[in-house]
Image: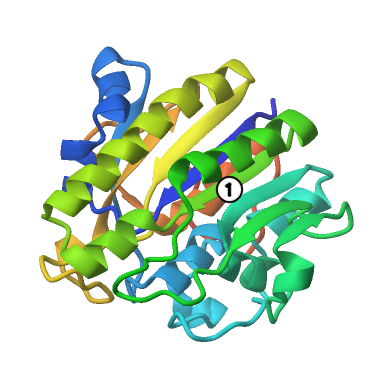
Amino acid sequence: MSRKVVLIILDGMGWKTARTLLGNVEGWVEKGDASVWKMRATLPSVSGPCYASIHSGVTPQEHGIVDNYKEMKTDVADIFSEARKAGRTTAAAAHSLFSSYFQRAPFDIYRDLEVDDESLPIQHGRFYTMRGETKGNLAVPAEADLFAQAAIMIDRHQPDYLLLHSCTVDSTGHRHGPDSAEMDHVVYVLDGVLGNALPRWLDQGYEIMVTSDHGQSPRGHHGGTTDEMREVAFYYFGDGKRPDAGVVLDQLQIAPTVLARLGVPPADSMRHPSFLT
């Protein structure tokens, strides 16, 4: 049986931040309506490489995205490409790097910022660039706006797979550190938006996965091998058979798991098994 899936990536939210500050999400875990596992990010634990690994199921050394500065379309199979081959509908509200990696590159702000094109891998897209970011202006979209864009696409197009990617936590961590009053506030606001959006999408028949690409060190850094940089939470709202709570998941399992829930065979290059059955 095929399901519809929303994957939410909360950029830069490490394991500790998620488990201590996401009160709404943790409330569903406590109630038994969601499950959570620890997940280890790929290396380097940098946004671009992790975005590509989450969606392709292969390492940065294989897909070729090894930093945040290479704007290119990957040549490996990914969730969007395999879902489209199987006739599924796709959508994304996310940073423009996702468009570059999985849609077309380079990103053209006048062509690619808003997309509704049935011929593309990401058929319905609402992207943001964060161009002009400074210490005084993080240039991130408000979570309320971003989640509303995703909700509108769900209402209009009923995509089988929707990616929602938020950068506020990562940007705040770089500017103020992950253990700061500023971080407390942005996660509080984000958790409230999640608290309103998740029941809406569950009622519309979606399974929901909430995770992050990487964590951060106390100095707001990531890219390396420490647990603070690599360990993130993975939350699941759905009826799939789940692994034990103590199992540590691998980020490379996300792509085959999402495709399995969509009822789509994983690509041969996705060597890690789905963790939901």
Relative to 166, residue 150 above or below: above
In this rendered view, identify the residue nearer to me: 197 or 90: 197
Query: What residue is at 78 percent from the left and 43 percent from the top?
Result: 89
Q: Position of residue 71 (x, y in %)?
A: 59, 82
Q: Which amino acid, by three-letter code, is at mark 1? A: Leu
Q: State the image quarter where residue 96 is shown.
A: bottom right
Residue at the limit of the structure toward the front, as seen here: 136
**Which residue in the protein does label 1 denote?**
163
- Residue occupying image coordinates x 78% and y 57%: 115
Rendered residue at 64%/76% (across/down): 74
Please tell me which residue is depicted at 78% across the width and 33% down the height of the picture: 156
Name the residue nearer the viewer: 112 or 135. Answer: 135
Q: Residue 35 is drawn in which quadrant?
A: top left
How many neighbours does mark 1 have within 10 angstroms: few (below 14), some (14-19), or many (20 or more)?
many
- The image quadrant where one finds the N terminus is top right
Q: Residue furthest right?
A: 119
Is residue 21 found left or right of 275 in the rendered image? left
Tell whether 240 sits left or right of 151: left
* Residue 19 screen position, x and y as percent: 20, 38
The local secondary structure at tag 1 comes to: strand
Location of residue 136 in the rendering, given as x and y in whole percent from the top left corner: 30, 71
User: In the rendered view, how is the structure colored?
Assistant: rainbow
* Near-viewer residue (40 or 232): 232
Is any part of residue 51 visible from this angle?
yes
Is residue 21 shown above or below 55?
above
| Image-based side of 190 in relation to 275, left or right | left
Whether residue 276 can be seen here: no
Q: Residue furthest bottom?
A: 70
